[in-house]
Image: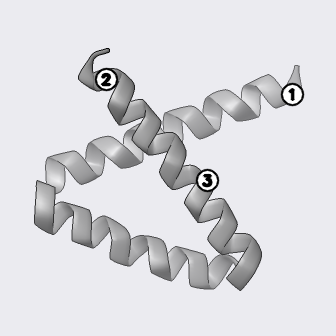
Amino acid sequence: MDMEHFKDCEAREWIARFRKKQLEEGRGEAMEWWSKIVKDIATKRGQKAADDLKQRMNKLREANAIRGKS
């Protein structure tokens, strides 16, 4: 397994956590929580890693949206 696989798995995990938070506490609270998470990731791993995670999450979300329409 390569690092790309693990990064994609991490993105899927954060998507699931965000959705759970959104269901439990609402979209506004989930967005606020997510902003703090991204800031923490940028602090610990660097802005490039945080941007990469967000990009992967968006790519996976878009791919799932396209599959859902088919």
Q: Amino acid at mark 3?
A: Ala
Q: Amino acid at mark 1?
A: Lys
Graded by Cα atoms within 10 Å as few (under 14), some (14 to 19) or many (20 or more), the crowding at tag 2 reads few
Counting every numbered tag in the picture gives 3
- Residue 69's mark? 1
* Residue located at (16% from left, 47% from top): 48
Where disc 1 sits, the SS reads helix
Residue 23: image x %, image y %?
A: 76, 72
Between the C-alphas of marks 1 and 3, the distance is 20 Å
x and y percent of residue 62 in the render?
A: 63, 34
Classed neighbour count for the residue bearing mark 3: other residues with Cα under 10 Å, few (<14), some (14–19), many (≥20): few
Residue, disc 3: 16
Label at residue 4: 2
- Most extreme residue toward the top is 1
Instruction: Judge left or right: residue 6 versus residue 68.
Output: left
> Where is residue 45 shown, x and y percent of the image?
13, 55
